[in-house]
Amino acid sequence: MASVADGNSMHRVLDVDGKVVGNFPKFASDPDELLRLYRILVLTRTFDTKAIALQRTGQLGTYASSLGQEAVSVGAAAAMQPDDVFLPSFREHGGQLWRGATLNELFLYWGGDERGNDFAGPRGDFPNCATVGSHPPHAVGVALAFRLRGEQRASVCIFGDGATSKGDFAEALNMAGVWQVPAVFVINSNGWAISVPRARQSAAATLAQKAVAAGIPGEQVDGNDVIAVRSVTERALTRARQGHGPSLIEAVTYRLCDHTTSDDASRYRDDAEVSRHWPAEPLVRLRNFLVSARHWDKDKEEALLHECNGAVEQAAKEYLATPPQPIAANFDYTYAATPAELAEQREAAIAIAHGAA
Amino acid sequence: MSELSLVQAVNAALKRAMSEDASVLVLGEDVGINGGVFRATDGLFNIFGEQRVLDTPLAEASIAGVSIGLATQGFRPVAEIQFTGFAYVCIDQILNHASRLRARTRGRLSCPMVLRSPAGGGIKAVEHHSESPEAMFVHIPGIKVVMPSSPARAYGLLLSAIRDPDPVVFLEPTRLYRAAREDVSDDGAGMPLGQCVTLRPGRDVTIVSWGAMIREALEAAEQLAADNIEAEIIDVATLKPLDSATILNSVGRTGRLIVVHEAPMSCGFGAEIAARVAGHAITSLLAPIERVTGYDTMMPYPRTEAHYMPSVAAILAGVQRTMAYT
């Protein structure tokens, strides 16, 4: 049997051309489910394009694109139940949209407004985690809560390959293993941690093998194959719900974009390398399959692009029309009840803002 | 009513909180069958079982991180960090996550957790076991920081910390764990957070302190009384949020302020108290504010730690300098 450490056991359903090369999971036999996945992938990329355009024109803050990696978080989120808890890093826009966060909330967050984290949809999901890899312990705590209450719920935590070098990751994986909590850890293994390539991040042959030391299952999946990502995550979640503990999934993908809009990847990465990875990107692959299975055609594609563009443009308009929060908001959410000393600062801040001081 | 040491009072508060609220959990290193290295969780494992008293792997950052996850799901975790020297790795989790989860999500998620740790020196412990990091925590918006100075206050303040809807760092003066006993009524009554306690009234000078140093402050007041100097002793108890009013009111009457703490002087919490008094009561001051503190060195090894920690003599000298201004 292939070992998770040799890198030869990558789980895959569709090859880069969209041909079926692996076991077709049950959900994928329903065309509507595949079309739902494809729709979110397209919506995510449409959002991505608009977000970068807004940032370039000074209308959005620094933004972390998910270009080429959309299938990782969409596939993982699609495997979840609504009352599971999603703990993203900061490139999981697709997963967040699948879970019910709105485009407007995503724009608000990247536009520098905390209300973007106050998801109307997935009320239990965590906000992004910008301090890389510090959130896996939260996923353990969330999952421990479910286990202690005997609930059939689980947590799903996503982070990048760079995060696997951090102590919190190792601690969390270890603790999850000891307690056998229902948590699934997914690595968006996109090859780069800003300018540091995967090879300089770890001497381990695969990142999935880091599961071995924690005594939990680990496997690699083609992170550009949304069907495979969902399938592998579903299996891990089933194990978790049945009391068989946590799993680590390394979703191997490629960061086709800069790290963020503040980054210039041409300083450290050859364009030729990026070009080599474009043919494997996740949207074309699923579309090719859908077309070959006669679930999709040019007209449907155009209609979908039109719909996604419309939704994104509308959300961007709403975001840009949303006035900033009142000065008081920052004070009012610091504690459940504002202490006297903070109330004084609150009044002073309001007075300064109104030109009274 | 029974006579309890401070560590027994902590134990009684934990027991009480766990009895009255099934969402209260205890987790940390050796807190289970061993009852914690100081026995703060002694007996809890037998009463409440492994589902509510969790021995963790040896990973302090994740003890804090896991507590955050639990707290978002309706539990009220009380995490024990064995010694404050091991608590610094928790600051990332407390600062970047626990303290701001409510604000970041605009109230959608919150983090009602307590991080308990013994703190301070004077027990001849090995290095990294005697630190006083309270000011580092006080600098973090969104949390509360508590440091009791007696068994009864440890009991009441810990109950309130556990019931609080926001994260609380609860620092227990190691030196006082078994130093004295006091009648503690295990009635489940919490002591309000955010209130100073005036332990001794006095008209001539205000001495403000917290944690273990309260003992030296009270002893100094006793000796000063023999010289007909009446010192008012204020136990801050909750460092964040600070009850400035009690301190300002006292200094308004005495005109003299001495702040005593074990932690290093620079940017110690004494500096914040001095700044607030200077900002709001400078016209009441008859003398410069005195800070009697540890030094800006590392906490020394046990053979010389007594020279590091503020002594009764050092406090008395500070008072004399203050009283010299007439």
Image (cartoon, coloured by chain):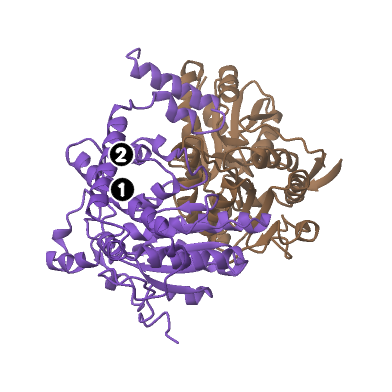
Chain colours: A purple, B brown
Number of residue marks:
2
Residue contact at pointers 1 and 2, CB within 8 angstroms: yes
Q: Nearer the viewer, residue A56 or A357?
A: A56
Q: Residue furthest bottom?
A: A1
Type of amino acid at the residue the image marks with label 1:
Leu
Q: Residue furthest top?
A: A356
Residue under numbered circle 2: A311
Residue under numbered circle 1: A43
State left or right for residue B261 relative to residue A13: right
For disc 1, the neighbor class at 10 Å (few under 14, some 14 to 19, many from 20) is many
Q: Percent position (x, y) of residue A124?
A: 52, 45
Q: Which chain is indicated by disc 2? A: A
Numbered tag placed on residue A238 in the rendering: none
Q: Percent position (x, y) of residue B229?
A: 65, 26
Q: Quadrant of the N terminus of chain B?
A: top right
Query: Which corner quadrant of the image does residue A69 belong to?
Result: bottom left
Q: Nearer the viewer, residue B274 or B92?
A: B92
Q: Percent position (x, y) of residue B160?
A: 68, 37
Q: Secondary structure at mark 2?
A: helix
